[in-house]
Amino acid sequence: MEITRLEPSQKKGLIVVITGHGKGKTTTALGIAVRACGHDMRTSIIQYMKGDIYAGEWDGIKKMGCTVELVSTGKGFCGIQGNPYPFKEHRENAQEAIQLTREKMASGMWDILILDEINNALHLGLVDLEQVLEIIRNKPEQMHLVFTGRDAHPQVVELADTVSEVVEVKHAYRKDIEPQPGIDY
């Protein structure tokens, strides 16, 4: 069987938002990175709020053999799960992530830029709405931007080309089952 490769008549960099209170927002974004790898696209992932607990994607991406990089800039989830870092440190890290995002956009090196948990960072005040809107306004025409995290801001949703909401129907955590490697982290 012959496989057809589709090519759009007009290429356009999209803004994709993956939000909601269900599990799978980062996993969906990582799936985009895997799909992009198959098209020889270059993907940079900046994690705004993760970084204090090991996640399998850190080493998994290294094993892919594609131009995918993952930069974890955060100190975990601000204010939950016993996270010991003060708000000020979380904000400083998120501001560094904003600067890194600007640099990645300006470099011309990346086809896709995934801003993991930026929605949460905005909701918590670690980054400002104007900073996120500036990222959207300054997006290179052909670059795809992917925003993940709960509580996507209505203005970000309005500007996006594609928005998906992940809804929790059931979660093992609610049955006191601990997070499992390869599934939850």
Image (cartoon, rainbow, N blue to C red):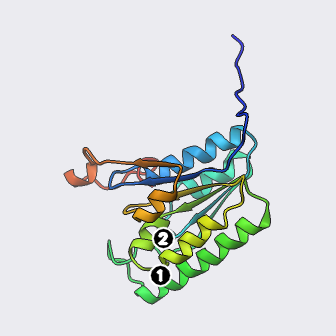
Q: Is residue 69 at all visible to an observer of this figure?
A: yes
Q: What element carries label 2?
A: loop
Residue at the image position 21 percent from the left and 53 percent from the top: 174
Cβ–Cβ below 8 Å for labels 1 and 2? yes
Query: Could you give the CA–CA distance between mark 1 and mark 2, rounded to whole angstroms?
Result: 8 Å
Rendering quarter of residue 176: bottom left
| x then y, percent, for residue 155 | 45, 64
| x then y, percent, for residue 161 | 53, 49
The residue that disc 1 covers is: 90
| x then y, percent, for residue 131 | 55, 76
Residue 179's disc is none
| x then y, percent, for residue 79 | 34, 78
Looking at the image, the residue that sits furthest to the right is 108
Residue at the image position 38 percent from the left and 51 percent from the top: 180
Q: Say how many tags the image has.
A: 2
Q: Could you classify mark 1 by the number of other residues whose Cα lies within 10 Å: few (under 14), some (14-19), or many (20 or more)?
A: many
* Tag 2: amino acid: Met
Describe residue 149's horizontal placement relative to residue 60 as left or right: left
The residue that disc 2 covers is: 49
* Tag 1: amino acid: His
Against 99, residue 152 (above or below) is above
Residue at the image position 38 percent from the left and 61 percent from the top: 150
Q: Could you classify mark 2 by the number of other residues whose Cα lies within 10 Å: few (under 14), some (14-19), or many (20 or more)?
A: many
Q: Foreground: 181 or 75? A: 75
Against 127, residue 15 (above or below) is above
